[in-house]
Amino acid sequence: MPRTLVTGAAGFLGSHLCERLLAEGHEVIAMDNLLTGNIDNIAHLYDREQFKYIKHNVTEYIFYPGPLDYIFHFASPASPIDYLEHPIPTLKVGALGTHNALGLAHAKKAKFLLASTSEVYGDPLVHPQREDYWGNVNPIGPRGVYDEAKRFAEAITMAYHRSHGLRTHIVRIFNTYGPRMRLRDGRVVPAFIGQALRGEDLTVFGDGKQTRSFCYVSDLIDGIYRLSQSDYHEPVNIGDPTELTVLQFAEEILRLTGSKSKIVHKPLPVDDPKQRRPDISLAKRVLGWEPRVPLSEGLGKTIEYFKTKVGGS
């Protein structure tokens, strides 16, 4: 039975990853300091003999007494609201937290997987984004604390791979949605669904012509798990290449919820990407992976989850 440490385990993605690892026969040590994570996301796993939760901030030294086979480093604020509210912890978890997690992996001779992000591409000048594109990032803008934390995390991960022979993986995660997202985390999926279910106007920033692509969480976790079982060490995009404008997405939410809400426009935030769509050719070739859950199906499940959070029926 592989023993696996997951940092950021009480977050949206971390909790789904813990479930998948348990299903694959792993013993899971879940680590989170709950800065943005929610203990309720993993509470249903407490009675599993193969599951253990440790409250710890990974920017501080990580001690674990027994052997480890895998470390999945998912600890980080991940939404604009979070990293704008916690800029220094975001930088610290990308730098110190990644360094500590890599040091532990090196000491335990464990495989290491870094949860990186499409934000390393910034406001891209290349479309769709391939892994060999270096990005267009404003390092001193308000979003730079997240973008540069992840870019540094990728750099130090590759340094450990090259210098210490550590078996590493880097997944660049594109927009993902599904149950356990926080209703008010500032991202477009929970924002639009929450507004629609409450009968509020849907807030579209700018003219709404900026594009996004949305991957359902089970598809994303499948891609991540496949990557962890591979021998591929360079970054890999995991996301859904189906591209929608934000305005089209808002209209889809209104259709699926049956809401009578209106769409209103507000000024575009600083450095908001105009286009975001993954090129997943590498994931298809190396991992045999591509998304399978249609947007309407995934949104239906997500809307049902959020109905329990806003008191809708």
Image: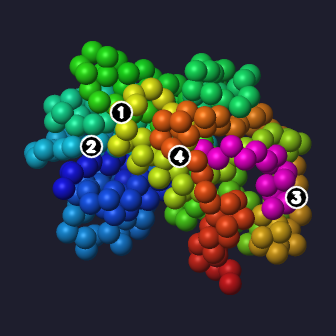
Q: Earlier in the sequence, mark 1 or mark 2?
A: 2
How many neighbours does mark 1 have within 10 angstroms: few (below 14), some (14-19), or many (20 or more)? few
Residue 119 pos. (x, y %): 60, 33
Observer able to see residue 33? no
**Mark 3–mark 1 distance (CA, rounded to whole Å):** 46 Å
Front tag of 1 and 2: 1
The kind of secondary structure element at disc 1 is: loop
Q: Earlier in the sequence, mark 3 or mark 2?
A: 2
Name the residue rendered at 48%, 47% in the picture.
223
Name the residue rendered at 62%, 21% in the picture.
133
In the image, which disc is placed on residue 231? 1
Name the residue rendered at 74%, 22% in the picture.
125
Quarter of the figure with the C terminus = bottom right
- Mark 3 — residue? 263
**Mark 4–mark 2 distance (CA, rounded to whole Å):** 21 Å
Judge whether residue 170 is colored magenta: no
- Mark 4 — residue? 289
The kind of secondary structure element at disc 3 is: strand
The kind of residue on which mark 3 rests is: Ile
Vertical order, 178 against 279 (above or below): below
Q: State the residue in front, 192 or 231.
A: 231
- Mark 2 — residue? 70
Q: Earlier in the sequence, mark 3 or mark 1?
A: 1
